[in-house]
């Protein structure tokens, strides 16, 4: 199945890309791919990262707004304390808190979050006719849905996964989700998430899964679901793929992901 043609949207959006040093080699392709292929007027492109002079310098050279994560979040990585079998996953959870904090950062009502290892290679828009477009994927990780049910107190509204490595967030819905969580747990939303993470798994919570299912439950007429059309490519093939392989890959895929863990053979 090939991606369907995508119309443009007049809805202006900001873009948030949380990142860390290990993804700096992919980041330029993420930013250029978004600017070339996201069919919305784009306001600011925010790069949220730990204090890092190289990431800051990249932002200054390329017209991005650098945001140090400590200035955005009311909690530090050290306070999260999420470790499974000796693997520290605190930073992974911290990045999810960044995505859910876009309502404190962005100027536009809508903001598109893109993981810093995922590159758009085809035109896409994420809102049309007053409806938000969510992309669903093939991944299905039961702990994500268990954490959602515990945190929000609702059954998942979708049998498909929203963990597509990007998502359009709407500030009003993000605020509604946080208020819902805080009313249920009587504690700040991020601490409530920390209480509900399945700490027996290295991946025990999903921001995209939580937000997507909540919006689909609260406002189902506001959402369209489309298939994601993504391909994971080994990180060592990054430069060769981006320089020589895009034309063929764009016939079948919307995005390419160059995960740091995918080293290939």
Image (spheres, rainbow, N blue to C red):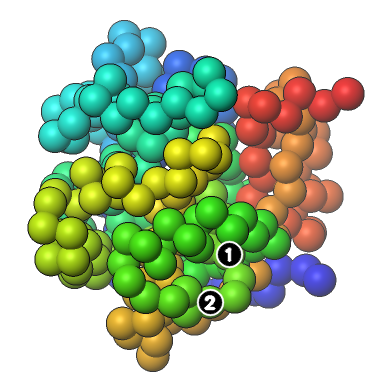
In x, y percent, where is residue 239? 71, 24
Residue 104, position as x, y percentages in the image = 14, 48
- In the picture as drawn, the residue positioned furthest to the right comes out as 265
Residue occupying the point 72% across, 29% down: 262
- Residue corresponding to mark 1: 161
Residue pictured at 37% horizontal, 81% vertical: 217
Residue contact between numbered discs 2 and 1, judged by CB atoms under 8 Å: yes
In terms of secondary structure, where does tag 1 sit? loop
Marker disc for residue 158 = 2
Q: Position of residue 137 (x, y in %)?
A: 64, 62
Is residue 26 found left or right of 13 in the rendered image?
Answer: right
Q: Secondary structure at mark 2?
A: loop
Q: Is residue 84 above or below residue 179?
A: above
What separation in Å lies between label 2 and label 1 (alpha carbons)? Answer: 7 Å
Mark 2 Cα-neighbour bin, 10 Å: few <14, some 14–19, many ≥20:
some
> Considering only vertical position in the picture, is 226 above or below 39?
below
Residue placed at 49% from the left, 69% from the top?
134
Pick whichever, 12 or 85, lies toward us: 85
Which one is nearer the viewer's eye here, 172 or 93? 93
Please identify the quadrant where the C terminus is shown: top right
């Amino acid at each position: 199945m090939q991606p369907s043609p995508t119309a443009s949207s007049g809805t202006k959006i900001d873009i948030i890309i949380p990142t860390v040093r290990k993804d700096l080699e992919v980041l330029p392709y993420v930013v250029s791919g978004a600017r070339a292929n996201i069919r919305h007027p784009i306001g600011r492109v925010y790069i949220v990262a730990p204090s890092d002079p190289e990431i800051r310098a990249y932002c200054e050279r390329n017209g991005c707004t650098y945001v140090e994560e400590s200035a955005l979040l009311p909690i530090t990585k050290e306070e999260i304390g999420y470790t499974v079998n000796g693997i520290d996953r605190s930073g992974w959870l911290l990045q999810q808190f960044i995505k859910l904090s876009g309502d404190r950062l962005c100027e536009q009502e809508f903001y598109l979050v893109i993981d810093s290892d995922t590159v758009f290679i085809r035109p896409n828009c994420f809102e049309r006719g007053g409806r938000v477009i969510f992309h669903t994927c093939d991944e299905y990780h039961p702990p994500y849905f268990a954490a959602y049910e515990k945190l929000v107190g609702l059954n998942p509204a979708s049998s498909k996964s929203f963990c597509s490595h990007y998502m359009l967030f709407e500030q009003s819905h993000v605020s509604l989700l946080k208020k819902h969580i805080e009313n249920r747990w009587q504690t700040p939303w991020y601490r409530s998430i920390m209480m509900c993470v399945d700490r027996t798994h290295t991946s025990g919570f999903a921001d995209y899964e939580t937000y997507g299912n909540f919006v689909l439950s609260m406002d189902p007429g506001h959402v369209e679901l489309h298939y994601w059309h993504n391909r994971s490519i080994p990180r060592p093939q990054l430069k060769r793929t981006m320089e020589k392989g895009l034309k063929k890959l764009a016939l079948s895929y919307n995005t390419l992901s160059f995960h740091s863990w995918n080293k290939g053979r």
